[in-house]
Amino acid sequence: MMELSSCLIVFHRLLIRLLLFTIFVSNYISFASVQQLFCHDEERSALLQFKDSFVIDKSASSFEGAYPKVLQWKSSSNCCLWDGIDCDAETGHVIGLDLSSSCLFGSINSNSTLFTLVHLQMLSLADNHFNFSQIPAAIVQLSGLTYLNLSSSTLYGQVPFEISNLTRLSSLDVSSNYDPDTGEKFLQLRNPKFKTLVRNLLGLEILILSYVDISSEVPDLLTNFTSLTTLHLSKCELYGDFPAKLFQLPNLQSLIVQFNENLTGRFPEFQQRSPLTTLRLRGTKFSGSLPYSIEKLDSLDMLDVRSCNFSGPIPFSLGKLTQLTYLNLRGNNFSGEIPSSLRNLIHLTLLSIAENQITGPIPLWLGNLTKLTMLRLQHNLLHGPVPQSLSMLVNLEKLNIRDNNLGGNLKFDMFINMKSLTHLRLGHTNLSLIFGKANRNATSHQFKSLDMSSCKLRKFPHFLRHQNELEVLLLGGNKISGQIPIWMWNTSTHTLIELDVRNNSLRGFDQLPNQVLPWINLAMFDISLNKFLGPLPIPPPSIVHYDVSKNMLTGEMPPLFCTMSSLRNLDLSNNNLDGIVPKCLGNSSSALSILSLRNNSFHGMIPQLCSSNNGSQLKIIDISYNQLQGKLPRSLSHCLMLEAIIVSNNQLRDSFPSWLGSLPELKLLILHQNGFYGTIEKPKKDLDFSNLQVLDMSSNSFTDNRFEGEISEVFGNLKALHSLNFSNNMLTGCIPSSFGNLTELESLDLSQNNLSCRIPQELKQLGFLASFNVSHNNLTGPIPQGKQFYAFDSSSFYENPELCGEPLLKKCGNSESLPSPPEDDHEDSKSIFKMDWIFILAGYISGLVVGVVLADIMMKRTPG
Ligand SMILES: *[C@@H]1O[C@H](CO)[C@@H](O)[C@H](O)[C@H]1NC(C)=O
Ligand SMILES: *[C@@H]1O[C@H](CO)[C@@H](O)[C@H](O)[C@H]1NC(C)=O
Ligand SMILES: *[C@@H]1O[C@H](CO)[C@@H](O)[C@H](O)[C@H]1NC(C)=O
Ligand SMILES: *[C@@H]1O[C@H](CO)[C@@H](O)[C@H](O)[C@H]1NC(C)=O
Ligand SMILES: *[C@@H]1O[C@H](CO)[C@@H](O)[C@H](O)[C@H]1NC(C)=O
Ligand SMILES: *[C@@H]1O[C@H](CO)[C@@H](O)[C@H](O)[C@H]1NC(C)=O
Ligand SMILES: *[C@@H]1O[C@H](CO)[C@@H](O)[C@H](O)[C@H]1NC(C)=O
Ligand SMILES: *[C@@H]1O[C@H](CO)[C@@H](O)[C@H](O)[C@H]1NC(C)=O
Ligand SMILES: *[C@@H]1O[C@H](CO)[C@@H](O)[C@H](O)[C@H]1NC(C)=O
């Protein structure tokens, strides 16, 4: 019995052990596959409902490796094993949900079952398309979140206050909810503001708000966020002064505040080493110098201060940041030489010092920075030779030294050996390019972009005939004469986008079949300022910018130009073209922005421009100096973008086009020397012309413009006018006193009319008036005295028998004299005038052609 019982006891113990072992083993097993055991039913169904609230759409995610993770979620299976799910080892609750780049498309709101997953600690819905939903306020129910990523997911509206209650967050990313095409930002931080949002999130390590419309200052408060490692605030409309202390956050590794145009700031003196590896301030108004103490940032890998307002020398200590792979100082006001210490930055792949005021030579040691793929030195004051050592840069893809004062000879052969070099810009450096043997034999090296502008070339370089991948070829400002060689018609026919041979002495296209340009993707074609003869070359339909101005081209303008739907700038000015302007131009593409036919021999009527109703982009029409006849086409009133109409020196016959007054952007109306006629008295309704700055209705001879009658008072309403010219018409009556309201007026020419009465005293209010001419009229009485009137030449008043007072010799009788006003600082107003005028013209000189078109006017009208 005893034995049996002891046996039983032993057995029992064994059993217990076995049981314990089983428990241990099963525990062990459950540890290994805990998720198998614990998937909470309600969480599974919440996840499935969440899944079902979306459709799967491949285009909802932009990441290349995106795939719909939810597709293999099945109601029968263990949710802890699903793709994108992480469960707690102990409790089996879903604590992590990563549905980034999962092709989810659809709306989300606070009713979503997602917000019942209250154990979540990590949530990423990044790179999906939530159809412009707001970030649901119910997010606050996920109070255990430490990681929240809602970037690039087409969420819209105010970032909810509730996020500021997620006090456990260590990583918050709501960036890049914006339209990449328009730049429109979908999310904003107004209420709550930035400061309120982050106030309680002191544990943040990562804060990424790029492309959120924050529109506030960077809160000082952030300097207390000592755990921050990453702070990214690109394109947030930040303004004010950036708190310099933020540079010294002890754990900060990545600071990106680029593209906040109104954000100012300066570097502090760095007291201690910093773990910063990435620092991007590009496109802000940071200013001051780079402090010597920047050497303390010795972990820096990337330093980008492009397009800021930094100045002073590049500090020698920058050479101590030997980890740098990317150094971009472009577009500041740095001066002095390139410090030799930069030779230590042997890991650099990009070095850009472009667009500063750097002097001295291009250093030889640059050839030792062999990891460089991009070297940009353009737009500086560098001089001396281009060192041969640069040919050691075998990884270099892009080299730009354009616009410097280098001078001397440069053997092009050195570039042939730089195997990776595809983009080479040497223009405007006063270099003389020399082509040696390599020029003949270089058949293998293919360039994409070549700028050899103003390199004193006399011929098309021979090696070009082997180039099959050129996209950009700039040969302007050389001394190339003769014809464009026949082999060019086989060069890069599929790739060439931009061809510029302007300002040479070229005469023609050698055997170009039917005058049709061979480059099927050409967008920019500029042969201006040459001696080309013959008919217009025909561009492909891809053409955007076509400039053949200042040549000796003849023949007619083919109607084909009407069908080029991308054409924006068409400049045929200063040639010997004739025939009519094709009628179809009236219905042509809405892309056309600048049309210049100036100084040719076109005749016939002006086509009915903008007659098709598809939003014309036409900004500038210059058809001056031709033999065009008829009226101004009334369709012009549909060209709502028009800024300048220049039709001077033609044979148009029409009355004053007050109907153009409704064009909201019109700044320039030049009718000079045509057959305009009629009165400018009492227009039917008030004159609009709210932005008109220059109005020229003058004429030169008795055969052209004949405006008659009185000048209506309503011209005093053209408040934006800077220049008004009525010279040589048959105007009668008084100078309207309403002209005293044209406070922007800088130039007023009423000479050679039949105006009578006194010169209104109100004109003394015109503080910017610098040019004034009323000669050859019948004005009477005293010339207003004082202010800017002191500055006018006596010839401004000649041939008005009844006019008296300074600067004329004729003294006024007592009855006529008026009290002399106090002395005034007319000198000032004159200097203001000059600057203002140039500034305003520069404002609407938007393209090359416009530059040419308006430069004349500017030259003519800028006094002194
Ligand atoms: C997206 O939003 C639009 C407009 O609110 C709505 O009509 C459409 O049904 C939504 N699409 C989805 C998939 O939710
Ligand atoms: C959420 O659901 C409730 C009840 O079903 C409904 O009244 C409410 O409009 C819903 N809210 C939203 C934002 O859809
Ligand atoms: C958020 O998700 C996007 C897309 O998956 C990713 O690129 C980004 O690094 C994530 N942000 C953070 C802070 O992890
Ligand atoms: C930082 O924290 C300290 C202590 O909590 C506080 O006194 C100070 O006002 C905070 N600084 C800012 C800029 O909010
Ligand atoms: C380039 O590096 C080599 C080897 O380190 C060195 O001998 C040479 O002096 C360097 N050249 C320049 C111009 O710094
Ligand atoms: C251009 O270089 C030549 C020598 O090659 C020099 O004589 C000339 O002064 C330079 N021109 C300018 C504008 O620097
Ligand atoms: C006004 O036009 C006439 C005739 O075209 C011209 O001679 C004169 O210089 C112009 N006045 C001003 C101020 O430009
Ligand atoms: C000048 O403008 C003011 C305000 O627009 C107007 O009241 C006044 O009558 C104008 N003066 C003349 C002389 O037209
Ligand atoms: C004023 O105009 C007349 C003729 O139009 C011209 O001879 C004279 O030089 C002009 N004076 C000024 C100052 O422009």
Image (cartoon, rainbow, N blue to C red):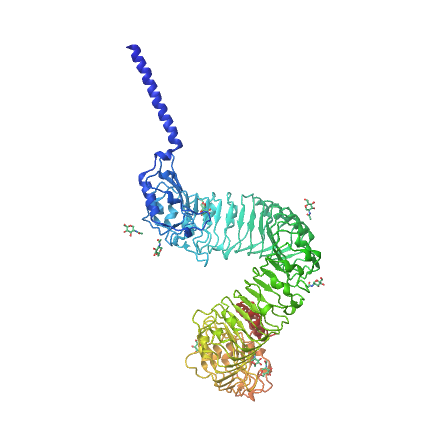
In this view of the protein, which residue sits in the foreground, 546 or 809?
546
The image quadrant where one finds ligand 8 is bottom left
Q: Quadrant of the N terminus?
A: top left
Q: Position of residue 546 (x, y in %)?
A: 56, 68
Q: Quadrant of the C terminus?
A: bottom right
In this view of the protein, which residue sits in the foreground, 688 or 372?
372
Q: Residue 11, located in which quarter of the rendered image?
A: top left
Horizontal arrangement in the rendering, residue 360 relative to residue 2 (left or right): right
Q: Is residue 87 above or below residue 18?
A: below
The number of discs equals 0
Q: Position of residue 792 (x, y in %)?
A: 58, 79
In this view of the protein, which residue sits in the foreground, 156 or 573?
573
Q: Residue 822, can we see it?
A: no
Q: Residue 861, can we see it?
A: yes
Q: Is residue 643 above or below residue 101?
A: below
In the image, farthest residue toward the top: 2
Q: Position of residue 722 (x, y in %)?
A: 52, 74
Horizontal arrangement in the rendering, residue 82 relative to residue 734 (left or right): left
Q: Is residue 157 above or below residue 803?
A: above
Q: Position of residue 544 (x, y in %)?
A: 53, 66
Horizontal arrangement in the rendering, residue 255 relative to residue 102 (left or right): right
Q: Residue 537, located in which quarter of the rendered image?
A: bottom right
